[in-house]
Image (tube, rainbow, N blue to C red):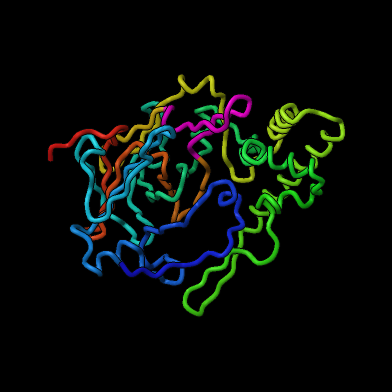
């Protein structure tokens, strides 16, 4: 298959520093693509490579599973879902946007989407975004802990320690581990066109947090503290930092008593139990439970807008029909089943 792609020469975001991406495969419509690049599914269709005008997602949320998930272009894998899909029409072809009905907490309406809400289903969004002040209040989440800070300690604490022990200055450590960048931001190349942009606020926040941690560790080194003790102390200090991205944390001991969350799509109820919308990050003393919802308050006339990301797609097998412009959801199977079909 011949395919045009966009080259990103550098990504300044912490997301790309912590998660090792090989690339990003955009699956929205061409109208929102960088440089008006043709989406991969559209290219496949033009080159006669698809049996049907659709693609489908099955995401395995079990981190210990051998198979993490599957995307099928031109069909669906019937081993990955339990019942027939519920379909809704695409209301705006940019992202995969549709209309969503009532939104419930513990089977009680919130009134948020009684008059319908616009929603987007997006495999590139990890959490579920929406007007979450009410949701996080009900499930006991508090936006006071910096998850990013704890992730830096958990994933880069050992390297930070080693660099400081070797004599690297705290101001240089974060650039060496990729959390502080200098020079121009993200650059995309499309033919002879070049554009540069950077999420400056996010970069500054994350870079400053990393440098703060490096200074903290350096001060503890001077007191001849052990590495394990220092890293535990760093995790505690992270708890006093506000989260720049709006994530909210909850008491892990209360997960079992939290309510079900329900989305109404195409007249059908799609439930999320607490174990599906609460994420756990870290191990041992660094374990934190993170709400799968994060705030995105879009004002009228475009709002209220929801984005159903991987949290939702991990529970519900999703089919994207670009031929009939519709989206389908069905309960996903956690494990593969033998299909005689």
Residue depicted at 36% across the width and 64% down the height: 39
Left or right: where does residue 154 sit relative to residue 109?
A: right
- Can residue 272 be seen by looking at this rendering? yes
Check the image and name the residue furthest to the right: 222
**In the image, residue 78 lies at what x, y percent?**
20, 41
**In the image, residue 116 lies at what x, y percent?**
35, 46
Region of the chain picked out in magenta, as a range? 274-293
Quadrant hosting residue 243: top right
Check the image and name the residue furthest to the front: 166
Relative vertical location of residue 10 with respect to residue 252 in this rendering, above or below: below
Quadrant hosting residue 184: bottom right
Q: Nearer the viewer, residue 217 or 322?
A: 217
Quadrant hosting residue 32: bottom left
Q: Quadrant of the C terminus?
A: top left
Check the image and name the residue furthest to the left: 341
- Can residue 242 be seen by looking at this rendering? no
Left or right: where does residue 297 sit relative to residue 232?
A: left
């Amino acid at each position: 298959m011949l395919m045009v792609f966009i080259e990103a020469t550098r990504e300044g975001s912490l997301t790309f520093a912590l998660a090792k991406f090989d690339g990003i495969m955009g699956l929205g419509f061409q109208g929102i693509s960088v440089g008006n690049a043709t989406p991969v599914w559209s290219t496949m269709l033009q080159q006669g490579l698809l049996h049907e005008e659709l693609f489908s997602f099955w995401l395995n949320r079990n981190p210990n599973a051998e198979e993490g998930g599957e995307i099928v272009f031109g069909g669906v894998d019937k081993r990955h879902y339990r019942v027939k899909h519920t379909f809704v029409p695409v209301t705006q072809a940019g992202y995969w946007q549709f209309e969503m009905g009532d939104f419930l907490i513990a089977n009680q309406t919130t009134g948020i989407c009684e008059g319908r809400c616009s929603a987007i289903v997006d495999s590139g969004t990890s959490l579920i975004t929406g007007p979450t002040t009410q949701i996080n209040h009900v499930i006991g989440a508090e936006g006071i802990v910096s998850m990013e800070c704890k992730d830096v300690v958990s994933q880069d604490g050992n390297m930070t320690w080693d660099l400081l022990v070797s004599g690297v200055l705290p101001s240089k450590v974060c650039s060496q581990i990729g959390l502080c960048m200098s020079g121009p931001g993200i650059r995309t190349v499309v033919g002879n066109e070049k554009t540069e942009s950077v999420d400056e606020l996010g970069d500054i926040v994350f870079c400053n947090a990393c440098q703060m941690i490096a200074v903290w560790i350096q001060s503890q080194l001077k007191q001849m503290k052990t590495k394990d003790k220092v890293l535990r102390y760093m995790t505690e200090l992270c708890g006093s930092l506000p989260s720049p991205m709006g994530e909210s944390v909850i008491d892990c001991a209360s997960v079992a008593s939290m309510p079900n969350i329900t989305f109404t799509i195409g007249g059908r109820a799609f439930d999320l139990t607490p174990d599906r919308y609460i994420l756990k990050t870290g191990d041992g003393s660094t374990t934190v439970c993170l709400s799968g919802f994060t705030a995105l308050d879009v004002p009228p006339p475009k709002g209220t807008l929801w984005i159903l990301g991987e949290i939702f797609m991990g529970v519900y097998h999703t089919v994207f029909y670009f031929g009939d412009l519709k989206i389908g959801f069905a309960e996903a199977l956690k494990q593969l089943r033998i299909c005689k079909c």
